[in-house]
Structures are given as structure tokens and as C-alpha cells.
Amino acid sequence: MISAYTGTQVREAEKPFLDDALGPGAGAVLMQRAAYGLANAVISALRGRGQRLYGSSVAVLAGKGNNGGDGLFAAALLAGRGMRTTAVLTAGDAHDAGLAAFRKAGGYAVTLTGDNAAELAAMAGGADVVIDAILGTGAQGGLRGPAAALIEALSRSRPDLVVACDIPSGVDADSGEAHAPVLAADLTVTFGAAKAGLLADPGADSAGRVRVIPIGIELALPWPALRRLEARDLSALLPRPERRAHKYSRGVLGVVAGSSAYPGAAVLACKGALAAGVGMVRYLGPPDVADLVRQSCPEVVCSAGAVADTHVQAWLVGSGLDDSDEQQLQRARDAADSGLPTIADAGALPALPEVLAPQVILTPHAGELSALLERLGVSLDRSAVEASTLSAVRRAAGLTEATVLLKGATTLVASPFQDFFSQAEATPWLATAGSGDVLAGIIGGLLAQVGADVGRFGDQGIDPDARWAAIAAMAASIHGRAGVRASGGGPVTASGIADAAREVMREL
Ligand SMILES: NC(=O)C1=CN([C@@H]2O[C@H](COP(=O)(O)OP(=O)(O)OC[C@H]3O[C@@H](n4cnc5c(N)ncnc54)[C@H](OP(=O)(O)O)[C@@H]3O)[C@@H](O)[C@H]2O)[C@@H](O)CC1
Ligand SMILES: [K+]
């Protein structure tokens, strides 16, 4: 599991180590570790591209704070390895000890002014590596003045390799909000712990690959602000049938989905659930949709019954529902009100009561989340949601008291108890019709199997209250991995994602 923290949490954790009572320059030790990790990461990245170190060039953009200090010390180490190093001091002022070490190692420093931004951008853009060490966790807002002009010009020239020091300058370490201009990094080398803003969009868009360098503060870190499940977490959390299992003990999912306009959504939701290994799927809906479901998935038991008369462990409602089909909408409301874990997708979102419960998982995309918040009296249009995904999903979970999964390049999940998960396994090829129905199916399939198994989650450090969010995150991860597998770098279909999800489950 990757644990991520706000900038404030990391700074708090660093404080005890900065105390001079620990010895003179105790804080400098942390900076040396950070700089060493950054320099090594740059060396690995260059070698990974088949480039020689000796004679390669690096431009470090250094702000006046400790982030700039990290960058200058790292550049000094790189100069010591034979790289040609230039520092652009973006604030006139610079970290004294860092600049002294940089100069001593043979580095050349130049000060950014109002007049030379374009010239220095051209110089930095021609370097083999650019290190962005302008702003870190001490930033207030984004880049301004000449530093903003430098980054704008440099972004246009698309440097070969950009390495962000701790966080891309202009990205908020707590929220992932990006204050333009931000220089998109290929790699972010972050210190002590991943910052939450690197694992939430749009910050994640600019971060590239994230590498965490331990600096000795790890044991002082509090409960994480955000977590990301990795393959081994999924392996530990996924259900395996017991020796004497039968279809009912493995979990039964009820599905209320599909309409004459979108019958395929019901099929894809059922396929997703079956791929997730559920014992049985019971479909409730109109006869024409049920016919298609039977033809495509003969394993599914179809009826036109009521929610109250249908014995299941979890519900999936909403995928492909028609907003004029009052009978299906009523089923969706009954399911969400049943007290059973329920995934509510697409057409169910506008139909449910405003206040729900943690075991109800809502799965909006940014536009649907904007509409949901609008109904709750919060005016946040789609682009505002996209600009601030973590805060938007937090607000939605707080107001609805439900678990909310926001779909996107990075999928964020928030529980109403302030547990957050972020998964980023997906490929852009996943953005295809029906993909969300498969995701809903996988969530439903997992809810039916492990929703009641509190101990399974506790063993992995997940609170009982957070398990609904963890299940949604597990499903997002499986769905993302399935998309990558089905795509192989090319187009995918939603059915292909469901097929691949079964293989991903087997591997995990
Ligand atoms: N603590 C530690 O021991 C360790 C910390 N580490 C490193 O330190 C980083 C945090 O360092 P930091 O606290 O010095 O802040 P940092 O992000 O460098 O910049 C803030 C400076 O810029 C200024 N400024 C602010 N906003 C601005 C803006 N929008 N545009 C322009 N300027 C702006 C602000 O000055 P002010 O405006 O307040 O006068 C301030 O001087 C952290 O990310 C990590 O890399 C590691 O070495 C491990 C050990
Ligand atoms: K930075």
C-alpha cells in the first residue's frame, strides 16, 4: 500500500528532526538525504535512457527555499559525477549552503530577471535533464513573474527529461490542484513520503512517475491522508472460495440496470460482476433487457420481481437506466434503502435521496459529480471538479454520507469518514462506452463477496468504516489493470475489459 500525506503532515513529521538539540545542522542531514536520493534518481533516469553521465548537462531551476536547496545540493553531486551543471536562481535569492556547495563543485549559477527568462528557458530546454526545484511544500499558490515566464517558455520547448524535486512547482501538495504554469515532469522524486497532491488529478497529470526517497522521518508520520492499493494488497483482500463453498455462500449480487435504450449496460454490468467471481447474479428489469442478458450471460437468473423479495448480499443499480422507467428507479431506491451494500451508477445518481449511507457507493464521472453537488447546493461545474478532484470528492462524500468514487485518469474514492483511496492503473483507452458499466459490475461483485467480511480489511489496516471505499478502490484497480491488459496499447471494448478482468483476478 502506498501511503500519501499532505505537505503539512510531512512538515510536522520533519519538525522533531530539525531541532538543533539533536546536534548542529540536524535539518541539513535530511536535506543531504533528499539531495542524494534526487541525484541518484536523475542518474538512474539518464542511464535508463542509455545516456552517459559524464559530459551530459543538467539545468536546475532553484527557488529560494529548501526545495531549491535540495536541487542545488543534488546538482552539486551531479557536477561531482562529471555532469555540466547550470543553476537558474529563480528568486534572486538562493539557499546559501546549497549554492555554496553547488559553486564549489564547479556549477555555474545565473540569476533569473525580468529580461532573461526566454534566453534561460532556451538554455534549460537544451539540457539533457531539467530539475524543477522552484517550489515545494512551502509554496503559497503558483509561480509568478519571471519564474512563471520561464516555465511557460520551457513547457513549450518540451525538454527531454524533467525531474521534479519533491513536487512539480505550482502543484499543491495537499490537494493536487495545479496553479498554471506547471512544468510537466517525467519523474517526481519526493522526500519522506508521497504527497497526496501527487496522487490526485490534476497534480498527478504533471507528476509523471513518482519515486519516494526515505529521509528518516517515516516513523514520525501520522495516519495517511490518502492511500493507494498495490497488487499485494489486492491479493490479500480478494476473496477465494472456501473448500465447502456454494454459490450462495460466495455472494449473490442483485442487478437493477439497463433499459430499452441501453440494454447493453445491463449485460456489461453482469459481465463485470461475473468476472469478479460472484457466486450468482440475479437480474431485475424489463423483459426485453432480461432476454438480452439471458442470451449474453446464461448464468444470470432474471426476473421482474421486487427488491424486497430478492435475496442477495449486495445490489448494483443504475447502469443504463432510463429516467422515465419509474419501476426500475423505484427498485434502485429500494436497493439503496435496503441497508445492503449498493453500488449506484449513472441513471441511479439523480434518482436517489440526497443523504445516503456509507455502504452505498456512488460512481460519478466529473460531469455527474458536478450535477450531484449542484443538487446538494454546491455550485461546481465540471471543469471546477476536474481542477480540484480531491476536494470535490471529499465534499460529495461528506454531504451525501455515502462512499463516492470519482472516475478519471486517476480514480479517487472518498468515504464519508474521510478515508481516501487513489488508483491510477488505467489507460486512456479505457475511456470507451460501457467501460463504466463493467466497473460497476466489478464493484458489485466484490461487494457481494467481501462486503460483510470486516476482518479481512482490518488485517490490512483498513477500518471497518473504510472498507466500502477500499472495495471501490480494489475494483478500480482491477478494472484499470484489465483495461491495460485488454488494450495492449490499442483500442479496447467494454466486453474485452470484462474478459480481461477475470484474468487479472486470477493473476492477483
Ligand atoms: N523541512 C526540511 O527539513 C526538509 C525539507 N525539504 C525540502 O524543503 C521543501 C520545503 O521547503 P520550504 O519550506 O523552504 O519551502 P519551499 O517550497 O522551498 O519554497 C517556499 C519558498 O518560496 C517562497 N514562496 C512561496 N510561495 C511562492 C510562490 N508562489 N512564488 C514564489 N515564491 C514563493 C517562500 O518565501 P516567502 O514568499 O514566504 O518569503 C519560501 O521561501 C520541501 O518541498 C522539500 O523539497 C527536504 O530537503 C527535506 C528536509
Ligand atoms: K519543485
Image (cartoon, grey):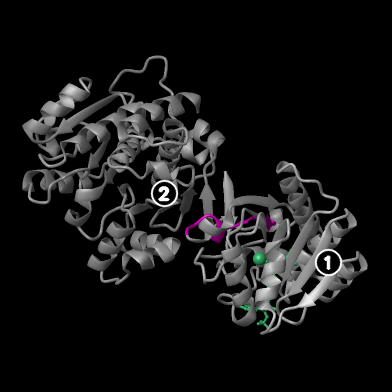
Mark in front: 1 vs 2: 1
The residue positioned 65% from the left and 63% from the top of the image is 10
Question: Which of the 4 quarters of the picture holds residue 47?
Answer: top right
Q: What's the residue at 34%, 37% (across, down)? A: 447
Q: Marks 1 and 2, how far apart in space?
A: 41 Å
**Which amino acid, mark 1?**
Ala
Is 197 within the magenta?
A: yes
Q: Position of residue 272 (x, y in %)?
A: 31, 32
> What residue sits right under mark 1 in the picture?
28
Secondary structure beneath label 1 = helix
Q: Residue 158 location, x and y as percent? A: 60, 60
Crowdedness of circle 2 by 10 Å Cα count: few (<14), some, many (20+)? Answer: some
Within 10 angstroms of label 1, few (less than 14), some, or many (20 or more) residues?
Answer: some
> Which residues are drawn in magenta?
189-201
**Label 2 element class:** helix
Q: Is residue 452 left or right of residue 319?
A: right
Q: Residue at x 71, y 66 (%)?
A: 124
User: What amino acid does circle 2 point to?
Assistant: Asp
Q: Position of residue 94 (x, y in %)?
A: 78, 77
Does residue 124 sit above or below 348 in this rendering?
below
Labelled disc at residue 465: 2
Q: Is 212 contained in the magenta span?
A: no
Circles 1 and 2, Cβ within 8 Å, touching? The answer is no
Does 378 sit above or below residue 419? below
